[in-house]
Amino acid sequence: MARVQLRIGSGAGFAGDRWEPAVELVERGDIDVLAFECLAERTIARETLALRRGDGPGYSPKLEARFRAVLPGCVAKGIRVVTNMGAAAPMAAARAACGIAADLDLTDFSCAVLLGDDVQAVLSERPELTLLETGEPLESILPRMASANAYLGADAIVEALASDAPVVITGRVADPSLFVAPLLHAFGWSYDDYAKLAQATVAGHLLECAGQVTGGYFADPGVKDVPALARLGFPFADVSTDGDVVIGKVAEAGGRVDRQTCTEQLLYEVDDPSAYITPDCVLDMGGISLTEIARDRVRVAGARAQPRTPSYKVSVGYFDGFLGEGELSYGGPNAVARARLAGEIVKERLVLRGFTFDDLRIDLIGLDSLHGPSDGRPDPYEVRLRVAGRTAQREAAEAVGWEVSALYTNGPSGGAGDFANVREILAVQSVLLPRELVPTRVELITAL
Amino acid sequence: MNVTVRDLAHARAGDKGSWVNISVTAHDVTSYERLLRELTEARVLEVFAPVAKGPVRRYELAQLLAMNFVVENIRGGSVTQTAALDIHGKSLSALMLAIRLFGNEPHTS
């Protein structure tokens, strides 16, 4: 009998997310598919770099722990897993998954791997492409390129799902596409069926950040309370073959699913709500309604879509210098004045030593670090000085934290609790690439 | 009587590179209509001036009692480059909620 409904669970909203909620979905969520979204905009550049420098596997660092936690239950119940945890090394990720499966004595295990998102070679031949953020030619950052990945869509993931492998591993794909693909696969929906593509894309968009639709990132004590946040449950969507979508969570799990949580997540990271572009369609949220149909159940209706665009968005990671940071705390009488003096000293020292910065910030955490100058705000009891400098020279970046720490014996009275850090900046910009330049393919990896 | 956005609505911030979006969802129709009148693009830019150059664009989703504000050109550069503590601008939902509304009276602050 053909399926009339599919329940897709969301197992992670970022690379470092908790995995207990995913285990809970497997054990008590009655889900058919479990998707893990683990690639933020810059994550894949970081993993590409780790792979190149030999200090990381190139795939999502928590892949092993996540798979050990969920695979036994998924295999036992026939729950298919779809994830972008492959990052910069999807084949290695699949081999790691097969190794874990063998370790856990899971039989008939295999992974389908989607390849083709890495387009560094294609971009190297096209320096004339325009960077969407700055309007500059790609050429300006090409010599410093660390990674380049196209956001593949659901159609490419469907090819991997067609293999019937229990686990599908991808590199860069659009976040909602991880959820759209199982629906296209299960229901045989086509790319001409815009109403259903729209509903599927909305479902994916609501699920892609996991706990952010079940009450995570929402609480404002006394105004917007969320029950049991320490046991926050992750969401699932019930999607029917006619495109009906209901968002929900496991009854016993912490959190809440209602119009408020769904509205906040619907508009999360959205520019023009009438034209939300994914590789699968251009979504129009203008007619969307959210209806609470039961406790922790919200029906999503009215999404519309236009056909997908002829190009893929490509995220280009590149080296953009260093960030040096130093911090030191001041408390008690005149704390703000002592911290300000400390900041001025560091600034002058960096000039005396001949270092230059593209941006040098002096923040007083507790007063003005988040929302700018503190006009009219009352002085807090304690503040934390933060000096941060962005520069092309590593030595200059190192000097920032060094000069802050030197304030212990050379600065104003009562400085305490120093911290210093330097990191290489991996920046990201985007270009558009015609679809025909990005061929994809699927490889099957089987456990030994 | 002066009220803040927080009295009428809830908010969430997200980012994509050098812009940040902040959704503002009203608690009821009356609050939504007041926000439509008073929480203008100009008022938001006025309060956000220390953290962004703008412009600010406002999109309205009446059936959800929601608006989406897109604030462009966050100072200090994009999320992947900035030296700011809040690299994503995620705390800016709270700045939005703190905006004071003055009724239809002219105001100076």
Image (cartoon, grey):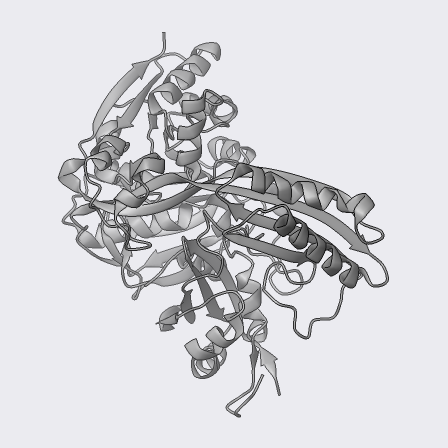
User: Would you say A248 lies left or right of A423 here?
Assistant: left
User: Would you say A364 lies left or right of A190 here?
Assistant: right
- At 60% across and 57% down in the image, what residue appears? A219
The extreme top residue here reads A448
Q: Where is residue B39 drawn, in percent x and y?
A: 47, 78
Q: How many labels does the image show?
A: 0
Q: Where is residue A89 drawn, in percent x and y?
A: 36, 24
Between residues A369 and A319, which one lies in front from this camera angle?
A319
Q: Where is residue B76 drawn, in percent x and y?
A: 49, 57
**Residue B104, placed above or below residue A275:** below
Between residues B87 and A305, which one lies in front from this camera angle?
B87
Q: In which quarter of the image is residue A301?
A: bottom left
Can I make out residue A240 in this image? no
Q: Where is residue A188 drawn, in percent x and y?
A: 19, 39
Could you tell me which quadrant the N terminus of chain A lies in?
top left
**Residue A75, placed above or below residue B93:** above
Could you tell me which quadrant the C terminus of chain A lies in?
top left
Between residues A43 and A136, which one lies in front from this camera angle?
A136
The extreme bottom residue here reads B105
User: Would you say A418 lies left or right of A99 here?
Assistant: right
- At 50% across and 76% down in the image, what residue appears? B46
Between residues A191 and A299, which one lies in front from this camera angle?
A191
- At 16% across and 50% down in the image, what residue appears? A193
- At 33% across and 52% down in the image, what residue appears? A202
Can I make out residue B77 in this image? yes
User: Would you say A205 lies left or right of A159 here?
Assistant: right
